[in-house]
Image: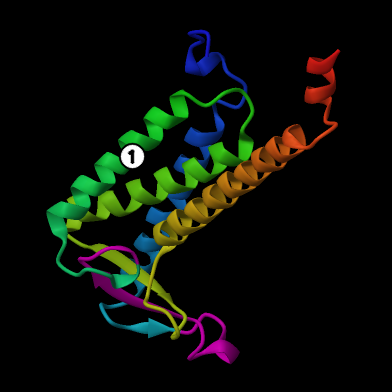
Amino acid sequence: MGGRHVLSRKGWWVLPLVAALTLALDQVTKYLVVSNLGLYESWAPVPGWAGRLDIHYVTNSGAAFGLFQNGGLFFVVVAVLVSAVILFYYRHLPDGQWLVRLSLGLELGGALGNLIDRLRLGHVIDFVDLHVWPVFNVADSAIVCGVVLLAYLLLREDRAERRKAKVADTPGSAGERASSG
């Protein structure tokens, strides 16, 4: 790190920009749903997909996708802790790491979107209904996409490190040739 300030690093803006866009999209879509539908009312935005993709206004006092109902304060605390961990981890990222920054921005924006609902309303507004999955929102989608992307990047990095270690350990590798000279 060399003590460089976060704002002097390349790509510092990715996380705040992605988080802000995610948060804005989440809050605008929730506002549109609440403004145009009554609670538990549905609307089929694509008539041919009715029953497969609907906008269905529901509330959720649990976690993403309606899990663990009535978690209230627990989920507020979790969202604050997750946001703090993301910001701490972000501060220590080296230059570049665009996809890691993108994934953390999605996770932070999603966590803040649902946190705002919990603090303001006592529950989260959900509305995307695929009928084969619990109803969810933009924030839930962003969190899941961010976590999946981060997990993929970590697995890819781990696999690359194992390949490097395997090559370094094979007889006749550059490491052995250098030490035998």
| Residue 48 position in % (x across, y down) | 59, 91
Residue 31: tell me if it is visible. Answer: yes
In this picture, which residue range is highlighted in magenta? 44-64
- The residue drawn where x is 33% and y is 46% is 112
Q: In this image, 7 relative to 167: left or right? A: left
What x and y, as percent, mark residue 101? 54, 37
The residue drawn where x is 50% and y is 82% is 53
- When asked about the image quadrant of residue 131, the answer is bottom left
Q: Is residue 120 visible?
A: no
- Magenta segment: does it hold 114? no
- Residue 95 is situated, as x and y percent measured from the top left of the image, at 61, 23
Residue type at mark 1: give it. Ser
Q: In the rendered image of this protein, does residue 144 appear above or below residue 100?
A: below
Q: Secondary structure at mark 1?
A: helix
Specify few, some or many for label 1: CA neighbours under 10 Å numbering under 14, 14-19, or 20 or more. Answer: many
Residue 9 % position (x, y): 57, 18
Quadrant of the snapshot with the C terminus = top right
Of 112 and 42, the residue lying toward us:
112
Counting every numbered tag in the picture gives 1
Q: Which residue is mark 1?
A: 83
On screen, residue 137 above or below 150: below
Q: Residue at x 24, y 48 (%)?
A: 78
